[in-house]
Image: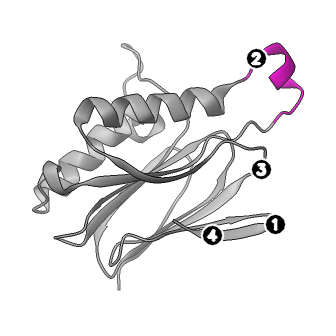
Amino acid sequence: MDNRQIGMAQLAVCRGPGIIRSSGLGSCIGIALYDPFNKIGGMAHAMLPKHRAGREGNRAKYVDTAVEAMLNEMEAMGCSKVNIVAKLAGGAQMFRDADKENIMMIGQKNIKAAEDCLQELGIPIIARDTGGHCGRTLEFNCQDGGLYIKTINNEAKI
């Protein structure tokens, strides 16, 4: 079985029964893409909402380029974009006091960027566990598309 661990600003794509894991999502957003017909999935641990010209390099660091890179890899493995669905997790507001001044709202910006990017590509978001004030650990099962989420006081599957 193909088990992969990704960190901040990384992504991976694999076939079921593979598992992709990522720990320590705070304001970062976890984007899981899945083709249920081909049992191929991808997950990115994106740090920032949007790539800007002149910031070349790590495509997994930004929501928009991470989604594009995952789609390219998934399509190269035989997926069709029309089959792909998405799940989102993360985008927490880790500094509670920042809410009052509307600064450091990276989590909300990452969530919005993921929603906008996926909508623009016609990829439906079928489940989400976003926002809040605590970090998350994710485990994405590429066999059944289940996204398992652990927080300090909760565990869920979406």
* Residue 138 belongs to the span the image colors magenta: no
Q: Earlier in the sequence, mark 3 or mark 4?
A: 3
Q: Give the quadrant of the N terminus.
A: bottom left
User: Which of the two discs, 1 and 2, labels the residue nearer the N terminus?
Assistant: 2
- Check contact, mark 3 vs mark 1: CB within 8 A: yes
- Asked if the residues shown at circle 2 and circle 4 are in contact, with their CB atoms under 8 angstroms apart, the answer is no
Rendered view: 59 above or below 49? below
User: Disc 2 marks which residue?
Assistant: 103
Marks 1 and 4, how far apart at CA: 10 Å
Q: Position of residue 121 (x, y in %)?
A: 24, 35
**Amino acid type, residue under disc 4 in the picture:** Ala
Q: Secondary structure at mark 3?
A: loop
Magenta segment boundaries in residue numbering: 95-104
In depth, the one of 11 and 97 nearer the eye is 97
Residue 48 visible from this viewpoint: no
Give how far across and how far down residue 15 sits, in percent. 26, 73
Question: Label 1's element?
Answer: loop
Badge 3, how many Cα within 10 Å: few under 14, some, many 20+? some
Of labels 3 and 4, the one closer to you: 4
Disc 3 to disc 4, how far (Cα)?
14 Å
User: Which residue position holds label 3?
Assistant: 134
- C-alpha span from label 3 to label 1: 9 Å
Mark 2 in CB contact with mark 3 (< 8 angstroms): no
Instruction: Name the front one of labels 2 and 4.
Output: 4
Residue at which label 4 appears = 156
User: Callout 2: helix, strand or loop?
Assistant: loop
